[in-house]
Image (cartoon, rainbow, N blue to C red):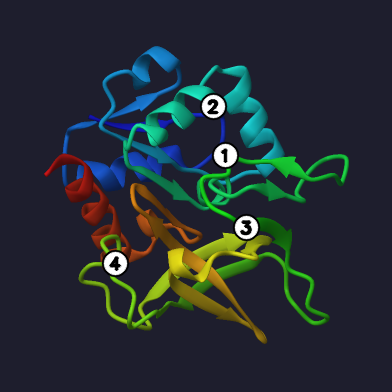
């Protein structure tokens, strides 16, 4: 069973609908007990980093997720779920760094280009690393379009875990990461038509096949 974690953030419905195209072996969960039998974990959603981590902690889910991932259970983070995979974020109420799961090295910072439109919203192209062996992007062509909506992005990321980047104004930043059993996309694959759905199908195969 793939556990889709409901931690009080948005976009749950479209994520569940997308998974239902390929499998019925998934379940929306919101308690630690529901994670016991999970063979894979999905962190979906829109929302703010600090509130997301606070919700996961208060629901007793954060530590269970950490334990599961350390055991080798695959995890897939989408949008804010993607950002939670990293060490810290500057997206907080008190303008102080907030701690994430720390599965990957890197920090979440706001776009600050002089003429940047924030949030980065709409369709943008992937730039897939040609020499990177990727499971999550299997069957995805370079320069495929994906749907984004976010104001923050990861920096100081280990290049070895980056499978694809995106260009926004004069900056390139990581948008697909994978390291062993850890996967994530800054964009919303469930809103990115056939290419995005292929990514979700790839994760399902990683977990269930």
Q: Who comes first in sequence, dot 3 or dot 2?
A: 2
- The residue pinned by badge 1 equals 101
Q: Who comes first in sequence, dot 1 or dot 4?
A: 1
Check the image and report above or below for 113 versus 74. below
Whether the residues at callouts 2 and 1 have beta carbons within 8 Å, the answer is yes
Distance from Cα at disc 4 to Cα at disc 2: 27 Å
Label 3 secondary element: loop
- The residue pinned by badge 2 equals 62
- The residue pinned by badge 3 equals 106
**Res 155 → quadrant:** bottom right
Estimate the x, y position of residue 175 in percent, counting from the top left.
49, 66
Estimate the x, y position of residue 203 in percent, counting from the top left.
26, 50
- The crowd level at tag 2 (other Cα within 10 Å; few <14, some 14-19, many 20+) is some
Q: Who comes first in sequence, dot 3 or dot 1?
A: 1
Q: In the image, what residue occupies the spot 34% across and 74% down? A: 132
Q: Is residue 85 left or right of residue 182?
A: right
Whether the residues at callouts 4 and 2 have beta carbons within 8 Å, the answer is no
- The residue pinned by badge 4 equals 134
Distance from Cα at disc 3 to Cα at disc 4: 20 Å
Work out which quarter of the rendered image holds the N terminus and state it: top left
Distance from Cα at disc 3 to Cα at disc 2: 19 Å
Estimate the x, y position of residue 54 in percent, counting from the top left.
67, 28
Q: In the image, what residue occupies the spot 45% across and 68% down? A: 160
- The crowd level at tag 3 (other Cα within 10 Å; few <14, some 14-19, many 20+) is some
């Amino acid at each position: 069973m793939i556990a889709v974690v409901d931690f009080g953030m948005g976009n749950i419905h479209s994520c569940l609908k997308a998974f239902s195209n390929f499998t019925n072996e998934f379940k929306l969960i919101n308690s630690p007990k529901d994670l016991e039998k999970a063979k894979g974990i999905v962190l979906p959603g829109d929302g703010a980093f600090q509130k997301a981590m606070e919700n996961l902690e208060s629901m007793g889910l954060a530590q269970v997720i950490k334990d599961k991932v350390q055991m080798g259970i695959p995890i897939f983070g989408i949008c804010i779920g993607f950002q939670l995979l990293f060490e810290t974020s500057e997206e907080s109420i008190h303008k102080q760094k907030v701690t994430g799961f720390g599965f990957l090295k890197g920090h979440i910072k706001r776009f600050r280009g002089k003429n940047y439109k924030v949030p980065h919203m709409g369709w943008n192209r992937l730039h897939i690393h040609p020499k990177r062996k990727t499971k999550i992007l299997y069957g995805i062509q370079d320069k495929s379009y994906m749907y984004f909506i976010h104001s923050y992005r990861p920096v100081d990321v280990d290049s070895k875990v980056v499978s694809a980047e995106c260009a926004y104004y004069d900056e390139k930043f990581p948008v697909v990461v994978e390291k062993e059993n850890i996967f994530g996309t800054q964009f919303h694959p469930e809103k990115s038509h056939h290419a995005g759905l292929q990514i979700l199908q790839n994760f399902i195969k990683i977990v269930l096949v």
